[in-house]
Amino acid sequence: MTPGAFIEALAALRFSDTFNPYAEACPDHDGVGAPQVRRENLRLVLEAALAGGVDSIWIARDLGYRGGRRTGLALTDEAHLSAHAGLYGQLPLARATRGPAMTERTATVIWQVLRDLRRPIFLWNVFPLHPHASGDPLSNRCHTRRERQASRHLLEWLVSELRPRVLVAIGRDAEAALADLGMAAERVRHPSYGGQTEFVARMGELYGLPAKAPRAVQLTLP
């Protein structure tokens, strides 16, 4: 499977109460051609990762409504698109939405660590779309086992092609979901809901970073 075929397979996924940012447009927030913008963002990052190689893949549970639903990139909100672009050499990543850039707490902490790490890390989710509560598209829910199994071939392709040194599961849910797919991973505490300090400390252990006091996460809320 080529990167283009991978993205087409991703865009073809359909589930109830799930938003596919590579095929669907949000009527409230997306700009013109938003799904195409997100597909292009992912294509640029994926091709750069395949060409240059990666150290690790960090895998969270599923896309969030403040981050990957809008950007098309896992664990990346609009405030950190430029940081993600710089991870692989200033890629021309673009916004797909209208209005002010949105910030996500998880993405903020993730990118604080990535800036210190300075290694090629690929970011992904066990379930690569945005699952939401029924009737509330701007909410987050945990994906189901059926959804996970239906999209597992995409994650397996990424791991096979990128050949990371290690998989890192962001949070207990991601670790359990990966185990269900037969994939072993190093687990770190999810940085949300009071987990920032443990997340930063565990990443420091995994990558040999010097210990430092955690930085406060500043968010601009809607």
Image (cartoon, rainbow, N blue to C red):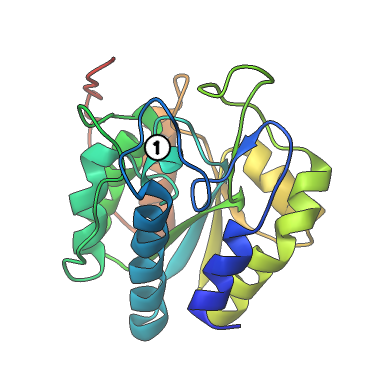
- Which of the pair 85/30 is nearer the observer? 30
Q: Residue at x 18, y 71 (%)?
A: 89
Q: Residue at x 36, y 85 (%)?
A: 51
Number of residue marks: 1
Q: Position of residue 191 (x, y in %)?
A: 44, 32
Q: Residue at x 44, y 20 (%)?
A: 194
Q: Position of residue 33 (x, y in %)?
A: 35, 50
At mark 1, the secondary structure is loop
Q: Position of residue 69 (x, y in %)?
A: 46, 39
- Which of the pair 120/21 is nearer the observer? 21
The answer to whether residue 187 is above or below residue 90 is above
Q: Residue at x 47, y 30 (%)?
A: 65
The answer to whether residue 182 is above or below residue 60 is below
Crowd around label 1: few <14 · some 14–19 · many ≥20 (10 Å): many
The answer to whether residue 105 is above or below residue 24 is above
Does residue 166 appear in the picture of this structure?
A: yes
Dividing the picture into quadrants, the one containing residue 104 is top left
Does residue 162 appear in the picture of this structure?
A: no
Residue that numbered label 1 is attached to: 67
The quarter of the picture where the N terminus appears is: bottom right
Dividing the picture into quadrants, the one containing residue 31 is top left
Q: Is residue 31 left or right of residue 6?
A: left
Q: Is residue 147 left or right of residue 100?
A: right
Q: Position of residue 155 (x, y in %)?
A: 63, 64
Q: Is residue 139 left or right of residue 85?
A: right
The quarter of the picture where the C terminus appears is: top left
Most distant residue in the front direction: 32
Amino acid under disc 1: Gly
